[in-house]
Every structure is written in structure tokens, then in C-alpha cells.
Amino acid sequence: MATKNTLYRSYSMEYGTFVGLCWGAMFFCYVEGISYQNGLLMLLCVALFGVACVLPFVLAMRLNKKLFAVGERLSYLQGLLFAFSMFMYACMMNGLIVFAYFQFLDNGLLMEQMESMVNMPEMITTYQQIGMGEQYEQMISVLKQIEDLTPFEKALMMFNNNFFISLILTIVAAIVASYDLTKIHKQ
């Protein structure tokens, strides 16, 4: 029996905030790891990536178990609405974190560090030796274009990327949120 109330909507906001904070922490560790060449932050970024991959599904299962405890469950459509809302709140939270980083903390340090990494003589030599000189020039051109973007445009790029990934993950998270747990408990 599918639930008639819309309690899951408030859970989508709460869970989306947690997922967005996880994505924001992963972004922050990544850019700070590159900016300051800190391997420990990069390792933390990899660990947060693992958490970010699992967290939405754990939270969807948590909601499913909460509803199961009171004798209700979400239909697949309700699960889809829950998952979509959760991921949209996550995208918004992460977009705000990315904007705040580029607006107030970065001051061009990330792009400066990336340009210095790409312009290392070993990197230029390697690209030329493998016959990718043209691709190297394109990469330099793209970095210059990204450097010219405003913090809002950089945050919007991240939001669009997260939105696309969220559309794909929504389908799977909806299955988890609407799975009939009575099948498991009958065994």
C-alpha cells in the first residue's frame, strides 16, 4: 500500500542537504588539494567520493525503513519525486558552496596552480612526444576560458554537471526508496 501523506517531502530536503554538504566537502578537498599540492586532501577527496556515491542510497533506504515501521511505503512515482527533490536540494547546496569558494576563498589560486602544472616542461615534452601537441594547445585554451569565467558561471557549470548526474541517480534511488520491504521480512 502506497503512502497517502507527503511526509517524504521534508525528508528530501533534509537528506538533500546532507548529500549536498558531502559533495561540497568533496569539492573543497579536491580544489584545496590541487591548490596546495596536498596529497592528504586528495586522499580525503577519494574517501568522500566513496561516501558521496553511497550516501543517497543509504538515506533512501532509511526513509523506506521509517515508512515500513509505520506500515506504509512509497510508490515508485513517490520514490521518484523524493529522489529527484533530494538530488535537487543537493545540487543547490553544492552550487552555493562552489560559488562561495570561488567568490570569497579562491582568488585565482586554483587556476594559477593548474596552469603551472600544465606548463611544466615535462608535461609539454610528454604531449609533444606522443603526438598530442594540438590537444595540448586546446587544453591551454580551455584553461584560459575557464579562468575568464565569473564565480557564478563556474558554480553554474558545476550545478549543471551535478544535475545531469542526479537525473541518472534519481532512477536508482527511487527504486531503493520504494522497494517493498515486506519481501525481505517474510523470509
Image (cartoon, grey):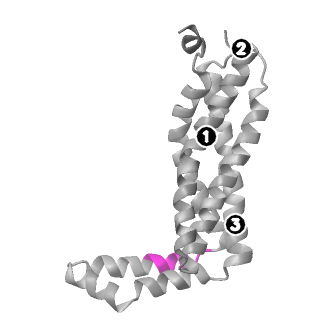
Q: What secondary structure is marked by label 3?
A: helix
Comparing 184 with 67, the one in front is 184
Residue 144 horizontal side relative to residue 121, left or right = right
Residue to which mark 2 is pinned = 72
Q: Position of residue 17 (x, y in %)?
A: 73, 47
Residue type, label 1: Pro
Query: Could you tell me the amino acid type at mark 3?
Result: Phe
Image-quadrant location for residue 148: bottom right
Q: Which residues are the magenta region?
A: 142-149
Name the N-terminal-most of marks 2 and 3: 2
Residue 157 appears at what percent x and percent y?
57, 62
For residue 61, say whether it is visible. Answer: yes
> At x 60% / y 74%, what residue is drawn?
32
Residue labelled with disc 3: 99
Work out whether mark 1 precedes mark 2 in sequence or the reverse, and give the earlier one: 1
Mark 1 — residue?
56
Residue 44, above or below 5: below
- Closer to the eye: label 1 or 3: 1
